[in-house]
Image (cartoon, rainbow, N blue to C red):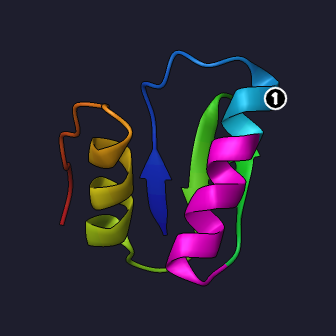
């Protein structure tokens, strides 16, 4: 499970970003309590997409 936190987005933009991440990673996921959860270890793909969109990414954990 890859979890994306710290995004200052409202519900609708967060869900759109989650959908885009799921499409890029080719897996499922969900939005819960302001965080995006993507199934599997897709850290590199998530990091690349978020940086392309202008976000600063800090990886945490294993």
Q: Position of residue 2 (x, y in %)?
A: 44, 63
Where residue 22 sits, quadrant-wise, is bottom right
Q: Position of residue 44 (x, y in %)?
A: 26, 69
Where residue 6 sits, quadrant-wise, is top left
**Helix, strand or loop for the magenta stretch, by majority:** helix
Q: Is residue 46 above or below residue 9?
A: below
Question: Which quarter of the figure is the C terminus placed in?
Answer: bottom left
Q: Is residue 44 above or below residue 18?
A: below
Q: Position of residue 14 (x, y in %)?
A: 68, 34
Q: Residues within 10 Å of mark 1 (few under 14, many from 20)?
A: few
Does residue 26 belong to the magenta stretch?
yes
- Name the residue located 34 percent from the left edge and 69 percent from the top edge: 45
- Name the residue located 38 percent from the left edge and 60 percent from the top edge: 46
| Mark 1 secondary-structure assignment | helix
- Name the residue located 53 percent from the left edge and 73 percent from the top edge: 24
**Front-most of 14 and 29?**
14
Task: Write the start and end of the magenta stretch as one range.
Answer: 16-27
Direction from residue 8 to residue 11 in the image, left or right: right
Direction from residue 56 to residue 20 in the image, left or right: right
* Residue under pointer 1: 12
Does residue 9 belong to the magenta stretch?
no
Asked if one can make out residue 60 in the rendered structure from this viewpoint, the answer is yes
- Report the number of numbered marks: 1
- Residue furthest right in the image: 12
Where residue 10 sits, quadrant-wise, is top right
Asked if one can make out residue 32 in the rendered structure from this viewpoint, the answer is no
- Name the residue located 63 percent from the left edge and 81 percent from the top edge: 27
């Amino acid at each position: 499970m890859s979890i994306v936190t710290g995004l200052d987005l409202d519900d609708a933009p967060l869900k759109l970003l989650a959908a885009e991440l799921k499409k890029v990673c080719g897996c499922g996921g969900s939005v819960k309590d302001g965080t995006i959860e993507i199934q599997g270890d897709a850290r590199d793909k998530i990091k690349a997409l978020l940086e392309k969109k202008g976000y600063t990414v800090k990886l945490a954990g294993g």
